[in-house]
Image (cartoon, rainbow, N blue to C red):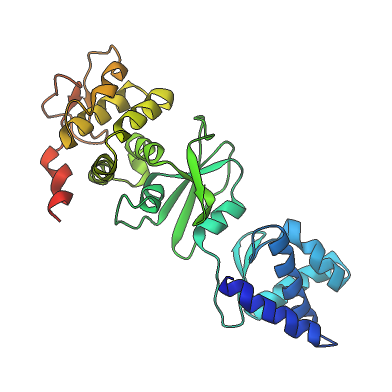
Amino acid sequence: MSALLHVTILDVVAAESNPVPSRVEAAYVALYRATSLADRPGIVLAEEDLPAVDNISGSRSRSHDLIADLEGAGRLRPVRRGAYVLVDPGGNVRVDILELIAALSPKPHLITAGRALQFHGLTDQHFRLIVVLVTRQARSWSWRGEKIRYSRSSRTLTGAGVRTRRARATIATPERALADSLDHPQWGVTLAQVAEALDVMLTRDRAFADRLATEVARDYGPASARRFGLLVSRLADDETARAFLPLRGRSKAAVKLVTTGPVAGPVDPVWGVRENVDLSRLTQHRGQ
């Protein structure tokens, strides 16, 4: 039984044992019941949960007054417009950021890039920017120093993520998270971090390179295939990178390994990638 559920059950028992509970206390209990029934305990969505408060207040305007009273009493904390989290009597919020993303994001959605790599244990970095792919426009928001940025994607989100007991939100598979990270350096994952995560996965499972190549072939272009082919060949060997060879495309123009990096650097003859960064830096994590 979770700590939040335990504390709130005590609240419910206390409220129901009091023949004349305050409206604020009754509203808190009603909101918890409503969020639990909606399978997002502790996360209040005003549009969906206010009817439970209307039964206590008698009108929508008075329900809004009760919401304000709960905020003032420190029992309700705003996340963004129309969304709140319940605060237990000890002043604690038992909801984590992944639960919030699951409740507040459009469906389908997919957490990708750095936070997905972190979730899968592929980096020891903590990424405060959480990139969430969606199929329609959505407004970004922040919570406790972490920024949730929505990015509209034309690529399929179906089958690209996993859900576990640790997260209600949908998290990108390691191959999808790596492909997005390399394809979108503006999402905060450096090439060195991509290389480290890729190295970890190749060590865990050499067949991972084939699954990554399948992901790249489905939704990404020849430039990504070339970059990953070079990285896999250097981190593992040419045989492990063989699945990327048919995906290189026909263009003879070299692609930069770091898209925002300098134009200078040798071109790998197999992959057609300009090595515009010292590749020895990409294996420095092995000595840590």
Point 37% across, 55% down: residue:
127
Q: Position of residue 6 (x, y in %)?
A: 62, 76
Location of residue 136 by image quarter: top right
Looking at the picture, tell me which residue is in the foreground, 95 or 62: 95
Residue 265: which quarter of the image? top left
Question: Looking at the image, which residue is at 54% across and 50% down?
Answer: 169
Q: Is residue 272 left or right of residue 156?
A: left
Quadrant containing the C terminus is: bottom left
Q: Where the N terminus falls, by quadrant?
A: bottom right
Q: Left or right? Give the position of 277 relative to 48.
A: left
Residue 152 vertical position relative to residue 80 in the rendered view, above or below: above
Asked if 56 appears above or below 203 in the picture, the reply is below
Closer to the camera in the image, 58 or 43 = 43
> Percent from the top left, x then y, of residue 245?
26, 19
Would residue 276 be visible to someone looking at this image? no
Using the rendered image of the protein, determine whether residue 227 is visible from the camera's viewpoint: yes
Query: Residue 52 in the image: x percent, y percent?
Result: 80, 65
